[in-house]
């Protein structure tokens, strides 16, 4: 497209692209924006070096003029968007890119690949956090996804409220608290379960977590307390009818005097099993497969569409797709979240007009509302408050506040309509 637009003389037309989801996949009540900080860092690094240019030249993908253009590529436009951790609904313009057509169209796959995956993880994680009713959750899904996406998934889950990850690279790169327990292989390595527990205690102290279900759970608990004493940090259960097993283990721990020993459970948990266990004497959850694959919805179905460009006279022209079931809404937009007198979200107000920070000034809005879009990139310069470890901390806190703003129906785990309607004005 860049090659053809350069030849046609339209590559430098000022254009506005939007990234949005037409619907909430999985019939969920709200989505969670995640990956924005990663996207901004990726835009800064997005270059065509000698190796990439040589590949394009050897394959005859584009003309020499386009290769020269790509060699000098640096994104110089503006990006607005929903800040990371914010919630979103169908049609929400999560990222708005204003630049030349050529610059903006190059970002399409980069933006979609990051936000589709990270937001799917964060949306699933947010539902799990609510289902846990304040009990901590740890992300443990690295073995169930790609080696690079595992690190990104840990980041997204943490933004949505998970308390820790078992992925040490995520801890190193993003400052996320890390945790871990022994696997069954460690117990099986030793001649007896007692020997395995003794080795773990000798290395890590009594505050560690012992896995008690390699053989018989009740005997495992007894052996754990016999080896570690009543100050053992926690036991982990990874199998069985968890509500029943957890209750028995809690009673047994209390009978043995280990009243402060915590119980953590794993075993293919999702938001529904977490909700079922939230009222049981479980102290914490470890979630693996379900969170890193978006609890069965591994993508948010986001798309990236051209919604406006300038004409030869410099005036803005709205454009939109009219394809069946794939209609887009043209025009530059701003967004406000409608709120009730009690501060509860009532509607996603997408205002057509002058773009971010503009249209709402002339719009007549009943009741109170707040601005949603924020500047992310200004004249090619990334806003630093959205990146790095500080950006993650801000996104985590933002998500906590935004979820509290939603109506109660948003927390339903059943399939249904979005928690608030999207209105175009």
Image (cartoon, rainbow, N blue to C red):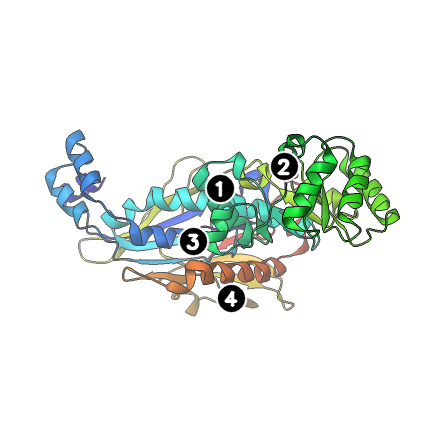
Q: What is the count of numbered marks?
A: 4
What is the distance, in whole Å, between disc 3 and disc 4 at their CAs? 20 Å
What is the distance, in whole Å, between disc 1 and disc 4 at their CAs? 34 Å
Q: Nearer the viewer, residue 41 or 94?
A: 41
Where is residue 197 drawn, in percent x and y? 71, 41
**Which numbered circle lies on residue 150?**
1
Q: Secondary structure at mark 4?
A: strand
Of the two numbered discs 4 and 2 on the same chain, state the one appearing first in sequence: 2
Where is residue 8 drawn, in percent x and y? 14, 42
Q: Which residue is mark 3?
A: 36
Q: Residue furthest right?
A: 255
Q: Is residue 122 above or below residue 297?
A: below
Q: Which residue is mark 2?
A: 183
Of the two numbered discs 1 and 4 on the same chain, state the one appearing first in sequence: 1
What is the distance, in whole Å, between disc 1 and disc 3 at their CAs? 17 Å
Of the two numbered discs 2 and 3 on the same chain, state the one appearing first in sequence: 3
Where is residue 359 drawn, in percent x and y? 40, 64
* Of marks 3 and 4, the one in the foreground: 3
Number of residues whose C-alpha sits closer than 10 Å to that of mark 3, classed few (under 14), some (14–19) or many (20 or more): many
* Of marks 2 and 3, the one in the foreground: 2
Of the two numbered discs 1 and 2 on the same chain, state the one appearing first in sequence: 1
Q: Is residue 418 visible?
A: no
């Amino acid at each position: 497209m860049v090659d053809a637009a350069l030849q046609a003389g339209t590559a430098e037309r000022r254009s506005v692209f939007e990234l949005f989801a037409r619907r909430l996949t999985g019939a969920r009540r709200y989505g969670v924006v995640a990956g924005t900080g990663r996207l901004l860092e990726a835009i800064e690094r997005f270059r065509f070096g000698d190796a990439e240019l040589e590949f394009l030249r050897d394959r005859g993908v584009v003309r020499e003029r386009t290769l020269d253009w790509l060699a000098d590529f640096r994104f110089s436009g503006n990006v607005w968007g929903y800040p990371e951790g914010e919630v979103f609904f169908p049609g929400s313009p999560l990222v708005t890119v204003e630049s030349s057509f050529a610059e903006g169209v190059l970002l399409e796959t980069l933006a979609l690949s990051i936000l589709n995956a990270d937001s799917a993880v964060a949306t699933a994680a947010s539902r799990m956090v609510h289902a846990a009713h304040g009990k901590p959750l740890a992300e443990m899904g690295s073995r169930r996804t790609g080696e690079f996406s595992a690190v990104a998934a840990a980041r997204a889950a943490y933004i949505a409220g998970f308390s820790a990850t078992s992925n040490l690279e995520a801890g190193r790169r993003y400052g996320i608290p890390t945790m871990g327990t022994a696997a069954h292989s460690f117990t099986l390595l030793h001649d007896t379960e007692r020997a395995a527990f003794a080795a773990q205690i000798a290395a890590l102290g009594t505050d560690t977590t012992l896995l008690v279900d390699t053989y018989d759970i009740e005997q495992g608990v007894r052996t754990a307390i016999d080896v570690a004493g009543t100050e053992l940090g926690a036991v982990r259960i990874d199998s069985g009818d968890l509500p029943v097993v957890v209750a028995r283990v809690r009673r047994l721990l209390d009978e043995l005097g280990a009243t402060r020993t915590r119980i953590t459970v794993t075993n293919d948990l999702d938001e529904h099993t977490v909700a079922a266990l939230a009222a049981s004497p479980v102290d914490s959850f470890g979630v693996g497969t379900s969170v890193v694959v978006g609890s069965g919805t591994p993508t948010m179905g986001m798309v990236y569409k051209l919604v406006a460009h300038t004409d030869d006279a410099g005036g803005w022209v709205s454009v939109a797709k009219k394809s069946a079931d794939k209609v887009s809404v043209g025009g530059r937009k701003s967004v406000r979240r409608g709120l009730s007198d009690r501060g509860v979200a009532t509607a996603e107000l997408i205002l057509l007009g002058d773009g971010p920070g503009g249209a709402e000034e002339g719009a007549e809005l009943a009741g109170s509302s707040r601005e949603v879009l924020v500047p992310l990139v200004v004249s090619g310069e990334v806003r630093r408050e959205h990146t790095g470890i500080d950006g993650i901390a801000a996104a985590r806190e933002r998500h906590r506040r935004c979820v509290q703003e939603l109506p109660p129906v948003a927390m339903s785990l059943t399939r249904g309509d979005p928690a608030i309607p999207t209105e175009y004005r």
